[in-house]
Image: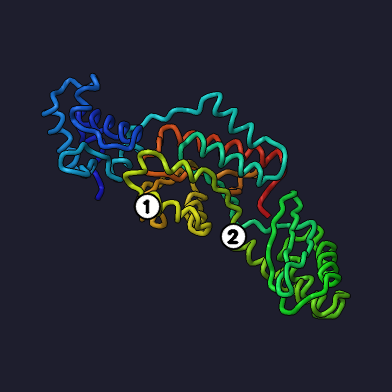
Amino acid sequence: MTGPPLSELSTRAREIFRLVVEGYISNGLPVGSKTLAGSGTIALSPASIRAVLQELQDAGLLAAPHTSAGRLPTESGLRLFVDGIMQVSEPSAAERAQIERGIAMGGTIEAALAAASAALSEMSAGAGVVMVPRRDMRLAQVTFVPLSPARALAVLVAEDGGIENRVIDLAAPIAPSSLEAAGNYLTAQLAGRSLAEAAQAIAAEIANGRSALDAASADLVRRGLAQWSRDAAQRPVLVVRGQANLLDEAAASDIERVRQLLEELESVEAIAEVLDAAREAQATRIFIGSENRLMSLSGSSVIATPWRDGEGRVVGVVGVIGPTRLNYARVVPMVDFTAQSLSKRIVQDGFSRQ
């Protein structure tokens, strides 16, 4: 249901609506007429306030969870508040310093992503998320370690220093010497190439018998490259921090929704699709509840904004996921500042999408 435009609300209705939304965002609880009357900001009796609350409810902006309870904003009400009423609060100097300090720390870009998502989580009371979509990993070294006769561990070291471990199934038992030969061969061949480029060149070399690998090692190299190239194309680099923040006192009364949200946060593909919707935006995008079909079951909100490389191309997306009572006025500029800080770090490092 879509609520009325802001211009149709009277001054007192707009003020009462604002107080209800801000009260809900503050503590996650319904706001009643007695609370509003006692706030000292509205010169109306509780009975008059109740009449206005009912008008706002009839307009689809507020809802009453119980007959005798106060009111909560609906998704339409939150959208009206975000688009037309809230006044953003810029991050403090201390908050800006915390974000910049974490992102500027030495190490890989993945470490900067982790620092950014952790800072957002800590300051927003939601889950901080940062994504670099579909970047073709460029490897500097590959090592195979035997785990069992049927499995081996591939240790992949990227050019930017990042390390990933992948378990690969063996078609047949392979001698340690053959595993070592496969790793050395891949390390030599991957220099300066993306996985996709290396897979094509190495496949041709193996097919023509020029690889100097035995049959078992050649098969391992072929299957490993095929799997890693597919992963690079399909799986984004995604960092999520702060899921525990979602289990606050207010969540106790809505534990099923929180359980659903935590399950959704376990799905890399689902979160990546959510954040991908914000990639083409010029500014911060806000998805409230069912506006985002992938997280509509948990009734969650997503605040996300893209970050860019030195040429202005979108590198990834940074954001916060949490309950609909996120402090939008505070979190929106915080997410925007984090995106700007990540962009600066990327420019300094000379990083770009491959």
Mark 1, secondary structure of its residue:
loop
Q: What's the amino acid at mark 1?
A: Ser
Of residue 149 and residue 331, the one placed in the foreground of this image is: 149
In the displayed structure, 288 sits above or below 199; it is: above
Q: What residue would you read off at disc 2?
A: 235
Residue 8 visible, this angle: yes
Q: Is residue 99 left or right of residue 74?
A: right
Q: Is residue 41 left or right of residue 128?
A: left
Please name the colour scheme applied to the rendered image.
rainbow
Q: Is residue 85 left or right of residue 330?
A: left
Indicate the quadrant where residue 70 lies.
top left
Indicate the quadrant where residue 24 lies.
top left
Residue 4 visible, this angle: no
In the picture, the quarter occupied by the C terminus is bottom right
The numbered dot on residue 298 is 1
- Residue 270 picture location, percent across and down: 48, 58
At x 50% / y 55%, what residue is drawn?
266
Q: What's the amino acid at mark 2?
A: Arg
Mark 2, secondary structure of its residue:
loop
At x 52% / y 59%, what residue is drawn?
269
The single residue placed furthest to the front in the displayed view is 148
In the displayed structure, 259 sits above or below 209; it is: above
In the displayed structure, 339 sits above or below 220; it is: above
At x 88% / y 75%, what residue is drawn?
212
- Residue 181 picture location, percent across and down: 85, 69
How busy is the neighbourhood of tag 2: few (under 14 within 10 Å), some, or many (20 plus)?
A: some
At x 36% / y 55%, what residue is drawn?
297
Q: Counting residues from the N terminus, which is met first, the one under dot 1 or under dot 2?
A: 2
Q: How many marks?
A: 2
Distance between the alpha carbons at the discs numbered 1 and 2: 24 Å
- Residue 343 picture location, percent across and down: 62, 40
Of residue 214 and residue 4, the one placed in the foreground of this image is: 214
